[in-house]
Amino acid sequence: SARVRIHHLQQAKERGEKWAMLTAYDTYSAAIFEEAGIPVMLVGDSAGNVVLGHTSTVQVTVEDMLLLTKAVTRSTTRALIVADLPFGSYESGPQQAFETAVRLMKEGGAQAVKLEGGVRVAPQIKLLHDSGIPVMAHVGFTPQSEHALGGFRVQGRGAGAEQLLADARAVQEAGAFAVVLEMVPAAIAAEVTKELSIPTVGIGAGVDCDAQVLVWPDMAGLNGGRVPKFVKKYADLRAELLRAAQEFAGEVRGGVFPGPEHSFD
Ligand code: KIV
Ligand code: NA
């Protein structure tokens, strides 16, 4: 079937139909998620943590994002592919954001980009939107600002609710087609979702968002460490992969693999 477009996401909100987004960083996972009917995939800079082994998303480069984005766009035809603008590649101004977004679309093959921030990045969102680049915004807890925000903390509580609302309004006004709400109290996320005409995509933001996103290695249980409270594990791929690797190693040590059926005459 045809490519998912941003107007389909807008129509889904108007009809009250929720949708799911997953991160994707490589060719097999992206193809599997497309087969599963995931309409939107995010080549997230969470790859810094879950693919590249960094301690945060801060270390991720545009070149890293290009490599991952290409792998995902090569193996998908239907899902809308959104690529993250990494830390340091858009903050200095709209022109910088434009140049990075163009690379992710032209070289990477992405159909949209995502950046973090509200009021402060509205000029960037506006230029991208005016240039014909669909932009997903990201407010609430923004991992690239981990050090400024003092760690992984819920945003928008108490007096923070007004700032969150202002940020959400600003990104919509600037032309974002959707906005991620990360680690926001469920009631505040519900209020933002009701007030905005564009879809909200929640992660740790309660059930009332228009859509939900999870980082796939977290939701599939590939991560052996602790995962945030907002993650639900839908599989235990780590255990399965561990078992397979142990069994392979054991069969090699025991002279069981390869069998005659895996050998040539
Ligand atoms: O990089 C990422 O995976 C994200 C999502 C958690 C929204 O930005
Ligand atoms: Na991200």
Image (cartoon, helix red, strand yellow):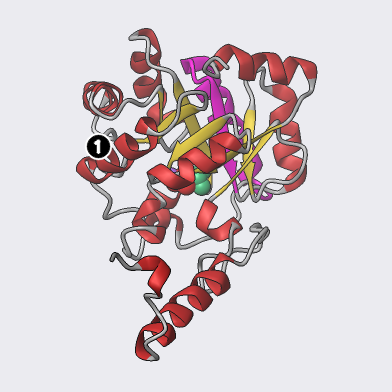
Q: Which residue is mark 1?
A: 89
**In the depicted view, which residue is nearer to us: 100 or 254?**
254
Left or right: 69, with 205 as reference point: left
Position of residue 261 measured from the top left corner of the image (x, y, whole percent): 42, 67
Left or right: 158, with 112 as reference point: right
Residue at position x 71%, y 20% from top?
13
Image quarter for residue 253? Answer: bottom left
The residue sitting at the bottom extreme is 254
Position of residue 254 measured from the top left corner of the image (x, y, whole percent): 40, 91
Residue at position x 34%, y 23% from top?
124
Whether residue 163 is visible here, answered yes or no, is no
Q: Is residue 2 above or below residue 18?
A: above
Which stretch is magenta?
A: 157-182
Q: Is residue 164 above or below residue 246?
A: above
Position of residue 203 measured from the top left corner of the image (x, y, whole percent): 61, 47
Image quarter for residue 115? Answer: top left
**In the depicted view, which residue is nearer to us: 8 or 31?**
31
